[in-house]
C-alpha cells in the first residue's frame, strides 16, 4: 500500500470532510495507508471533530497532528456538532504538526506521498526543521530522502498574468509560507487548482441522510453539495495516473508572491512541478466522487 500523510485546514469549508472520506475509504480498501493526518488550522473542536470523523469512517487511532499556533480568520460550522460528547482527542492531545510529519516520513517502510488540502505553513516549517530524535536529517534532506510526491489543492493557474487563491492568501504568514515552500520544494508537486474544482459539485447524493458527512454538509449550508476542490485532489492522488483520473498536466514552476499571495505559473518542460487540467466533463468527476462518498 502507498503510504500517505494528509494535511487539512478542517476549518471554514466542508470539502475537506468529503476528501477525508475519499481518503478513508481508499485506506480501508487497501489502496493507500494513511500514516497521519495534520490539522493546519486550529479552532476549538478541530481535532476532536477530525478524530470523530475518522472513527466514524472506521479508522480509530490514526496519528493526528495539529499546528496549535495556526489561527486563521473565520469560524467552523460543523465541527462542534461532529465532535459531540465523545471522548475524542483534543487539540492538546495531538502531536505537534511538524513532529507528526517528521515521524511519518522517518518511520514509513517506503517513501511517503503527502496530500495537502489546506494551508502550507506546516510544510514550510517542515522544510526548515532541524534534525531531531526522529531522524538525523534536516527537513529538506528528509523530504528528499523520504517523500515521493506532494499532491496539493492550491493555486489558480488558468490566468496568464497570475491570480489569487484563498489557500495562498488568507494571512501574511501563509503568503510567506507558500512562497517559501513551493518555490523551494525539493520533491515533485502536483497542483489541482481552484479552476478545476469550482464547477464540480458533489455531496448532494447524501441530502436527507443521517450520516456524519451529510450532517456536516447541512451545518455548512451545503446540503445540496459543495464545490469539490479537496475530494478531487484526494481522488487524483489515490488514482495517481493522470489519464485515468481525467487530466493532463502543464509542467513548470509555481510562483507565489510573499507580499500578497498572488500566484502565477512559469512554464518549463523540465520542471518538477505541474498543475492539472481537466480532460473530461464535470459529470465524470462528480459521479466518481459521489459513488465513493454516497
Image: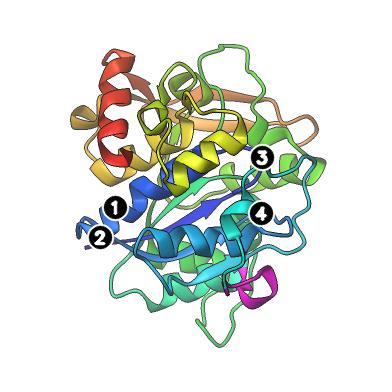
Task: For marks 3 and 4, give the CA distance.
Answer: 12 Å
x 52%, y 64%: residue? 51
Tell me which numbered mark, 3 or 4, is placed earlier along the sequence: 3
Q: Residues within 10 Å of mark 3 (few under 14, many from 20)?
A: some
Residue sticking out furthest to the bottom: 133
| Of the two numbered discs 3 and 4 in the rendering, the one whose residue sits closer to the viewer | 4
Residue that carries the numbered disc 1 in the rendered image? 25
Q: Position of residue 203 (x, y in %)?
A: 41, 31
Query: How many marks are shown on the rendered structure?
Result: 4
User: What's the CA distance linking mark 4 and mark 2?
Assistant: 26 Å
Which residue has dot 3 on it?
Answer: 12
Residue 81 seen from this side: yes
Decide which of tag 2 and tag 3 comes sooner along the chain.
3
Could you give the CA–CA distance between mark 2 and mark 3, rounded to whole angstroms?
27 Å
Q: How dense is the environment of label 1, judged by Cα within 10 Å: few (below 14), some, or many (20 and up)?
A: some
Q: Residue at x 32, y 37 (%)?
A: 236
The kind of secondary structure element at disc 2 is helix
Residue appearing at x 66%, y 47% in the figure? 180
Alpha-carbon distance for marks 1 and 3?
23 Å
Question: What residue is pinned by disc 2?
Answer: 28
Examine the image and state in which quarter residue 270 appears. Answer: top left
Q: Which mark is residue 239?
A: none
Report which residue position mark 4 lands on: 80
Q: Position of residue 95 (x, y in %)?
A: 60, 75
The residue stretch that appears in magenta: 87-96
Q: Secondary structure at mark 1?
A: helix
In the rendered structure, which disc, 4 or 2, sits on the residue that comes first in sequence?
2
Amino acid at each position: 500500500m502507498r503510504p500517505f500523510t494528509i494535511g487539512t485546514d478542517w476549518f471554514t469549508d466542508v470539502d475537506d470532510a468529503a476528501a477525508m472520506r475519499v481518503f478513508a475509504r481508499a485506506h480501508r480498501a487497501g489502496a493507500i495507508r494513511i500514516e497521519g493526518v495534520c490539522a493546519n488550522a486550529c479552532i476549538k473542536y478541530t481535532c476532536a471533530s477530525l478524530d470523530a470523523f475518522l472513527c466514524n469512517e472506521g479508522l480509530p487511532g490514526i496519528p493526528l497532528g495539529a499546528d496549535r499556533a495556526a489561527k486563521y480568520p473565520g469560524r467552523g460550522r460543523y465541527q462542534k456538532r461532529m465532535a459531540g460528547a465523545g471522548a475524542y482527542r483534543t487539540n492538546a492531545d495531538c502531536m505537534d504538526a511538524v513532529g507528526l510529519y517528521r515521524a511519518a516520513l522517518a518511520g514509513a517502510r517506503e517513501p511517503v506521498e503527502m496530500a495537502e488540502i489546506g494551508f502550507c505553513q506546516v510544510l514550510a516549517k517542515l522544510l526548515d526543521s532541524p534534525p531531531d530524535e526522529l531522524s538525523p536529517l534536516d527537513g529538506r534532506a528528509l523530504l528528499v530522502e523520504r517523500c515521493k510526491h506532494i499532491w496539493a489543492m492550491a493555486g489558480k493557474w488558468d490566468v496568464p498574468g497570475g491570480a489569487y487563491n484563498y489557500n495562498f492568501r488568507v494571512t501574511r504568514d501563509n503568503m510567506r509560507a507558500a512562497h517559501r515552500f513551493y518555490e523551494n520544494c525539493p520533491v515533485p508537486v502536483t497542483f489541482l487548482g481552484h479552476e478545476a474544482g469550482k464547477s464540480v459539485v458533489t455531496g448532494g447524493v447524501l441530502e436527507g441522510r443521517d450520516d456524519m458527512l451529510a450532517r456536516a454538509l447541512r451545518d455548512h449550508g451545503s446540503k445540496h453539495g459543495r464545490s469539490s476542490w479537496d475530494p478531487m485532489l484526494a481522488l487524483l492522488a489515490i488514482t495517481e495516473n493522470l489519464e485515468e483520473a481525467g487530466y493532463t498536466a502543464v509542467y513548470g514552476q509555481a510562483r507565489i508572491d510573499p507580499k500578497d499571495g498572488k500566484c502565477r505559473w512559469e512554464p518549463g518542460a523540465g520542471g518538477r512541478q505541474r498543475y492539472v487540467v481537466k480532460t473530461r466533463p464535470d459529470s465524470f468527476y462528480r459521479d466518481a466522487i459521489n459513488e465513493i462518498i454516497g
